Structures are given as C-alpha cells and as structure tokens.
Amino acid sequence: MSPLFLIRLVLDFTAAGLLLVALAYWWLDNTSHELIGTGMFILLVSHNVFNRRWWARLPKAARGRQSLLTIASNISIGLAMAALLMTSVMISRSVFAFVPLNGGPTAREIHILAAYWAFMLAAVHLGLHWSMIMGVTGKLLRVGPPDAIRTAALRGVAGAIAACGIHGMVVVGIGDRLVGRPSIDFWDFQESTVGFFLHHIAILGAWACAAHYAAGWLRWAGGVRRVTDAGE
C-alpha cells in the first residue's frame, strides 16, 4: 500500500474533522472559525489535486447508475464548497478582511446553508467510498477475510449509528438548516459541548450508511438487470 495513499486518507479525514469543528461557530471565536475554515479549504485543494485525473475523465465517465450517483455526489459537494468559499470571503472579518466585499445578511444565510449541505454531502461522499476505506483499514490492522459474525456485528453497529443519527437530526434541527429556514435556536455549548459533536458525528454516520447501502443496492440491481438481459 502506498504511503502517499495513506497520507491522502489522513488529509481527507482531517478536512472532514475541520468542517465539523467549524460548524461549532458559537463555541469558537470568529478568528478561530475562519482559520479552521481556511485550513479545511487548503486540504480540499490538495484533495482535488490528488484526484485531478478523476475530474479529467469526467466527460467520458461510465453511464451506470452507480457511476451517476458518484458523479452527482462529487459535483454537488463541489458546488456546495464553492458557495461556502465565496461567502466565506464575502463575510470574513479576519482572514479575508482585506477583500473589499460585504456580503451582508444574505451572504451569511447562504454561508450557513452551504456549510450544512457540504457537511451532509461529505457524509455521502464518505459512504460511497466506505468499502475502500474498510479495505485499507483491514490491511493495516491485518484483519482476516470477512466472516458472518463480524459482518453481522458491523451491520448492527451501522444500524445503531443510523438510529442515533436520525435522533441527532431532530435534536440539532438539521432540517431547518438544510432548507435555509431562519432559526434563533442555537446550541448551548455551556450546557454540553460534547453533545454537539456526538450528534453531528452520528448524523454524518447515518448519511454515510445510507449512501453506502444505496450504492450497494444499485450494484446489486445493476447485476440482476444484466443477468436478466443476458437471459432474454
């Protein structure tokens, strides 16, 4: 396994972690929030540099349903991140304060909307690559071939995480964030800081699980269709 590939994985998970921390705006001061966001975007640039060949092959990408799901996911997260970056520059009071732009309240609303969509789409992106990540982890830990007991246990854990994620979406009010609905309800970090991160990690896990199993179902459905067509 290439050390460069492992470094890429570490950088990708670090970027996801920075996005999660950046969501806790009211736990941070504004300067820290902007510095964390800047670090995240630097890592995202490196991620896309490493994956430049994928973007170059995009016009000739396969037309299978799973491929379309991956393409739609990558383009969507790219658009969300672009909106997040543009509004970050427009409303910056520290890192990009020298830029002569003033986005005002509308840019702030778009910034929050883009941030939560980027978070959810990052979870989907993670789920679509989960098999690869588990394969790498298995090699690093020298885990043996799959067996029924371990598979059942992992699926049970995935189900528990999904349940916690659904509960977390209700507690955090993620629905309002994703449709840009104005809300004066903010997380009380004085009451519980750990709770904020646990709920969001569970939400990330739930969406990643949904994407992983959706991709698996599409692979299965595509295989069944090919077998059926071949038998006709």
Image: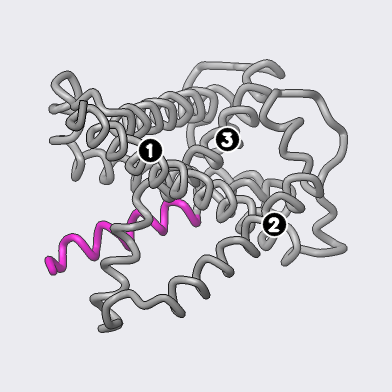
- Taking the spot 17% from the left edge, 19% from the top edge, the residue there is 59
- Taking the spot 72% from the left edge, 39% from the top edge, the residue there is 174
Q: Tag 1, which secondary structure?
A: helix
Q: Percent position (x, y) of residue 42?
A: 34, 44
Q: Residues under labels 3 and 2: Cα distance?
A: 23 Å
Q: In the rendered structure, does residue 3 fall within the stretch colored magenta?
A: yes
Is 19 placed above or below 58 here?
below
Predominant secondary structure, magenta span? helix
Is 127 placed above or below 118 here?
below
Front label number (3 vs 2): 2
Quick check: can you spot residue 63?
yes
Q: Tag 2, which secondary structure?
A: helix
Front label number (1 vs 3): 1
Q: Tag 3, which secondary structure?
A: helix
Task: Say which quarter of the image contains residue 60.
Answer: top left
- Taking the spot 71% from the left edge, 32% from the top edge, the residue there is 177
Of residues 152 and 193, the one drawn nearer to the viewer in this rendering: 152
Of residues 221 and 106, the one drawn nearer to the viewer in this rendering: 221
Give the magenta part as a residue range: 1-17
- Amino acid type at circle 1 is Leu
Mark nearer the N terminus (2 vs 1)? 2
- Amino acid type at circle 2 is Ala
Check disc 2 and report the residue beneath it: 163
- Amino acid type at circle 3 is Ala
Of residues 222 and 117, the one drawn nearer to the viewer in this rendering: 222
Check disc 1 and report the residue beneath it: 218
Check disc 3 and report the residue beneath it: 115
